[in-house]
Image: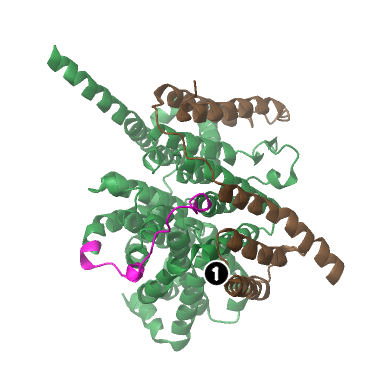
Chain colours: A brown, B green
Amino acid sequence: MRMLPDRACAAAMAAVAVLAFAATYGFDEVPPGLAQGLGAAEFPRLVCLVLLGLAALLFLGAAPRNPPPRVPATGWATMALAVGFLPLMMVVGMLPAMLVFLVAMGWLWGERRWGVLLGSAIGLVAGIWIVFVRLFALSLPGGWLGERLFS
Amino acid sequence: MEAFLAGMATLTDPLILGMILAGTVLGIVVGALPGISGSTTIALLLPLTIGVSPIAALAFMGSIYCAANFGGSITAILVNAPGDPSASATAIEGYRLAERGQAGLALGMAAVASAIGGIFSVVMLIFAAPLLARAAYSFGPPEYFALAVFGLSMCAAIGGDGRVKNLMTAALGVLLATVGIDLTSGVERYSFGIMELSDGINFVPVLIGLFAVSEMLDQSTRRAEEPKLITMDAAKLPTLADFRKCARAIGLGSVIGAFIGALPALGATTAALVGYNETQRWSKHKHEFGHGALEGVAGPESANNAAVGGSMVPTLALGIPGSATTAIILAGLIVQGVRPGPHLFNEQPVLLYAVFASMLAANLLYLVLGLGMAKLFARISLIPPTILWPAVFVLSIIGAYGPNQSMGDVVIMLVAGGVGFLFRRHGFSPAPLIMGLVLGGMLEEALKQSMIIFDQNPLGFAQRPIALLLLAVTLAGLLGPMLLRMLRMMRPQKEAV
């Protein structure tokens, strides 16, 4: 028998609360001179107990409802692209990674006009460079390749 | 009266007017860009104000501050990515309206509500600054603790599938706020040896991840659906009937915003979230909330802009900044040789009234600019999703990275995006988590200080009337609906007997 979706959520939240509560025992000891009143661990423990209580309420009051729909292939591919952005950026730098991402995701979502894809991607990246790098002097990560080429 | 008129007369100076116009336009633009907030812009441009008169410098900074809050609502409404944290509450209903093809309606309402809230708070600032400051500073740690608990309890009513889920998310936000070094003992908590977590979790990347990235992921699961055709109705502005419907929300938001803004450390973001909650609580159209309620845009927008004037009260009257932005403005004032404090009202009244006048002018100016450009902004919602959402993701990356130039923040944003996506699928609203994260630090600090004041006896709260009242209202708000439900359940049984 499948667990009710809300009960699964309550169980997940309870697990977070229990793990966070347990982790407070790993905090460094406070020197006795500083240990007055509420210490570093008491407040998080209190919050964990509140969270645990609320998780119990949700578990007990869970009503049957439809589970969320399955994530389609495009959804998983979008998540993979979003996560893949980070390693790509570490290699080629932030601005080139953005360019690749804009084109790849636009294509994945169904845009087949290469002129539109490339034009909008180049325009946006150029805009970001002008506003954030030139105007606000933000230094963006150059990546492994950028450091090799420009340092 | 003479000082008041002299202050207002500074608006006839072309330089001052030019500074106000430049500050307002710049404020709207930077407010709309995720990651570049009004405070960042003022900090970056502070050196430019050294060469001009104190009045011109303050007019410029005040205008950016006023307009950036409104600017933040533009991207919040159009793509669910609040340009400024204070616009996060606006995104809840504003984005639903944009999805329905009514972006112009939401943007127009945001402009008008923002301007009314802003003007209300400046008028309050002019006439009631000393009184408001005194009221705000009768708040000690116990009152702040009670206020934070009250604020968090109100999360129960924000969107999502239920009160328990909302309170749970808020508690999770408070728990996240404990990550990093504990300021009282110096103990590291939940950082697991990761250096980026030692300073705590910045709420800007969490906010962007929970709202914008999760929205993009959610959109990606609906690619197979028939795309919703957004017509040019998107560019239609609100009518007089719409404004009439939202009048109560605007009034309520303005009062709440001005008061919360005046309390140190509680800025426009808290004001907007409380404004949203209270608008929903007192609305005659509660059923519209969560599905694109126009009042849900008007309430938080008037509140976050009213908080701007409110936060200037402690800054000018006591020299204690009410928010991050006013802290930078305070630095700007000191650079100009102006020392804020109670004496300022006696020694430099013309300067003070000139600041108030420039803030009034900035509010009127962005009302005109906002309404005039709402149609133009609304057309952004007509951009095809294949171009719009990848662009939102890229801007989110910049928004998360920008404030601290930290890759750790980008990772936090991506994780928050994943969590936000799961929240959406299981009926959890992300807004309470933000509120918990914003108020968590203050909650812990105020509780620790209160316990020291009460010699570790929690019954000490009973000796503080304001704190006691706030805690009683919180309890009533949380338990009231439960008791009412129980009473309703018992009634048919009695009738049956």
Point out residue B456 in the picture as x, y percentages from the top left corner: 53, 26
Point out residue A28 in the picture as x, y percentages from the top left corner: 73, 30
Residue B234 drawn in magenta: yes
Point out residue A88 in the picture as x, y percentages from the top left corner: 74, 57
Point out residue A118 in the picture as x, y percentages from the top left corner: 63, 72
Residue at x 55%, y 39% (from the top left corner):
B445
Residue lying furthest top in this view? B497
Q: Is residue A136 left or right of residue A60?
A: right
Specify the segment rendered in magenta: B219-242
Q: Main secondary structure of the magenta part?
A: loop
Against B35, residue B491 (above or below) is above
Residue at x 47%, y 68% (from the top left corner):
B383
Q: Nearer the viewer, residue A136 or B421?
A: B421
Q: Is residue B421 left or right of residue A133?
A: left
Q: Nearer the viewer, residue B469 or B203?
A: B203
Residue placed under numbered mark 1 in the picture? B333
Against B361, residue A92 (above or below) is above
Whether residue B395 is visible to the viewer of this picture, yes or no, is no
Residue B252 drawn in magenta: no
What is the chain letter for disc 1?
Answer: B
Mark 1 closeness class: few <14, some 14–19, many ≥20 residues within 10 Å: many
Amino acid type of the residue that numbered disc 1 sits on in the rendered structure: Leu
Q: Nearer the viewer, residue B17 or A64?
A: A64
Q: Nearer the viewer, residue B465 or B91?
A: B91
Q: Quadrant of the C terminus of chain B?
A: top left
